[in-house]
Amino acid sequence: MSDAVIRSTEGRIGILTINNPPVNALAAAVRAGIKDGVEAFGRDSNVDAIVLIGGGRTFIAGADIREFGKPPSGPNLNDVIATMENSPKLIVAALHGTPLGGGLETALGAHYRVALPTTRMGLPEVHLGLLPGAGGTQRLPRLTGAKYALDAILSGRHIPAAEAKSKGIVDAIVEGDLLKGAIAHTEMLLAQKAPLRRVRDLSVTLESPELFAETEKSIARKARGFKAPWNIIKCVQAAVELPFDEGMKRERELFAELLTSTESAAQRYYFFAEREAAKVKDVPADTPQREIKTGGIIGAGTMGGGIAMNFANAGVPVTMLETSQEVLDRGLKTIRTNYENTAKRGGMKAEDVEKRMALITPTLDYNALKDADVIIEAVFETMEVKETVFKKLDEVAKPGAILATNTSGLDVNQIASYTKRPGDVIGMHFFSPANVMKLLENVRGKATEKDVIATVMSFSKKIGKIPVLVGVCEGFVGNRMLRMRGIQSAYMMEEGALPQQIDKVVYDYGFPMGPFAMSDLAGNDVGWRIRQGKKEKEKRNVRYTGYVADAICELGRFGQKTGAGYYKYNLPDRTPIPDPEVEKIIEETSKKLGITRRAISDQEILERALYPMVNEGAKILEEGMAQRSLDIDVIWVNGYGWPVYRGGPMWWADNVVGLKTIHDALLKYRDASGDPFWEPAPLLKKLVQEGKKFSSV
Ligand code: NAD
């Protein structure tokens, strides 16, 4: 008998306690232990019923990730669950913690279920591009009806115990000691001579004959490009339409299809990449951290306000400084309106609006920042203003306070040099809207202390962000790579493509929108003003990219906000409508530049939009501006909408396109255009020669 599942008895009840810390993952020994235990108690004439419970902090929390990709060993989960379901002795599963995935599926094999009020259960496989493959899609609908089960499995969300009880997933909520409560419930069932209620024998309620067609329609946009949601719908439909065993067979087939799909491989990779990205190679996990109890923010504009909300949402008091009462009031009003709108939509309680506002203290006085543990600067993007602010912060901030800048384009090392404590200075590059966007590029300066990095990385998580550490370079990682796509998009427009064609290719690849729709959304005037401010039009040997963009801005076509940009808009509808006016501007520009327009294929558009980004990613890796290729992928998936089912630019290059294909395509475009832009990065060349991947760096 393995000790992964411990057998004991309490009167005439056999107890199986799962003992596989920390989260009782479904390792082979656990599966075998449950199966053997159920069989042994089944034969034991001194046992009338069985309670299955998790030792420690949770019932089975899911599959054992250490077994992923290894050849299967021990009984498979479906056998274990079938053994439970067919047991001659009544089985009650006692749930606490987070019975997720295979954990909940195991519990569905019991005849009855009880849970602590704090239990949160669910079938989250969809997040890994999979579906519950051990009967979850067949059993859950039999308990809850098809509609609810579909929603639960498609969202993968955690279901609180009370809701699970109201939907029939659990039969009783147990207060106090779970084991005692479960035994009492089991004794009650025995006294009532309750039947062995096999979920497989229940029939499924189908609330509406249109359910599946309607669900497909309703998820179409969000599930575009993903495979799992569509297979999940098919599985639940099978639960409704087929006998149980055939439904199980269908589930297995549809699961196998996902398991071998690129989409799921990408999603599983990404799941771990995001966790890995929080780790810093030369900053060990046990690096002492500075305590952060209060924060300060300089600037109450677009970014400052959003950043303040992150602090307040996490319950960290923050002082926000501005240059005038008027701007400060305006900034606070925007924050309040944001919260009130969230409350109106049901996203937070009305009384929480005041609680969060109370955590944000406005000020015009730098002395109010003297106790702040971390101060984030989000003022205008000029070095002069940053210099003033950091010199002032150096005077007032307490020793050991972390001084962060939210600059998107200025040199963090230079900013640090305005203080006498450059080791305490770091970049925290939030994305707009800062209260919504999860990505946070934390920028390590050459002097940034390791404990500052450790503190900021972990504080980032506290305020709900997904942090990635990057180095000081122009545009950091995300915007630096984005620029490559922008350059080629501009050139392709001059050479013969229209914004709608380029946008469609990028959208069809899986991005939420293409580069021109994105520019219209962000405001074309931002880049225009930057270009006007620059003395010389060329940068880094790149031919000027702004001819069409400038012409469009000169007509006041700043994008959605003016009702026209690269597209027309019938505001308030924000659907981009292709515009013959723009086509004319583009054609005239080509003529002026002496370019004969030609048809550009979708394949060429895709390659020219994305391969240069991968090439830039290679340079970033080589320069050490990102720690690993996975960090780049996390930045792109979280900050820029790279479809997660393609893993991110570097994973996609490594595993889908292949580095040699990209390398050769770069050479092809270089030779055709004569443009040094296309020169493959030395690292890319080297990896191709060695037959290696970015992930090996
Ligand atoms: P913004 O113009 O909306 O806000 C800047 C605020 O700083 C203004 O309210 C201004 O009154 C205030 N300010 C200016 N000088 C100040 C000073 N000396 N002391 C105190 N307050 C001062 O600008 P924003 O979009 O919030 O950008 C702020 C910073 O964040 C910039 O460095 C920008 O590059 C960076 N950033 C912006 C975005 C974005 O999408 N907007 C994204 C990432 C980073």
Image (cartoon, grey):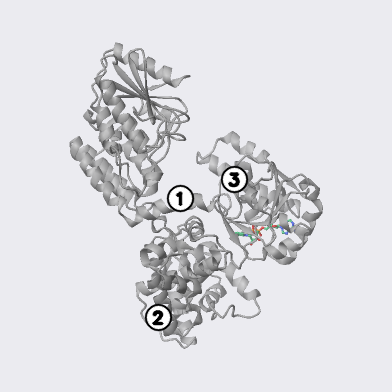
Residue 204 got which mark? none
Residue 463 got which mark? 3
Q: Secondary structure at mark 2?
A: helix
Task: Name the residue nearer the viewer: 16 or 196.
Answer: 16
Specify which label sits upstream in the sequence, 1 or 3: 1
Q: Quadrant of residue 666?
A: bottom left
Q: Residues within 10 Å of mark 3 (few under 14, many from 20)?
A: some
Q: Going by the image, does 183 lie left or right of 199?
A: right
Beta carbon at label 2 within 8 Å of ligand 1: no
- Give the labeled residue for mark 2: 668
- Give the labeled residue for mark 1: 272
Marks 1,3: beta carbons within 8 A: no
Task: Name the residue nearer the viewer: 628 or 652.
Answer: 628
Task: Name the residue nearer the viewer: 424 or 534.
Answer: 424
Residue 647 x, y percent position in the rendering: 42, 58
In the displayed structure, 581 sits above or below 404; it is: below
- Of the residues shown, which amino acid type is indicated by label 2? Lys
Marks 1,2: beta carbons within 8 A: no
Task: Name the residue nearer the viewer: 608 or 632.
Answer: 632
Residue 670 x, y percent position in the rendering: 44, 81
- Of the residues shown, which amino acid type is indicated by label 1? Phe
Q: Residues within 10 Å of mark 2 (few under 14, many from 20)?
A: some
- Of the residues shown, which amino acid type is indicated by label 3? Ile
Quadrant into which the N terminus falls: top left
Q: Going by the image, does 75 lie left or right of 638?
A: left
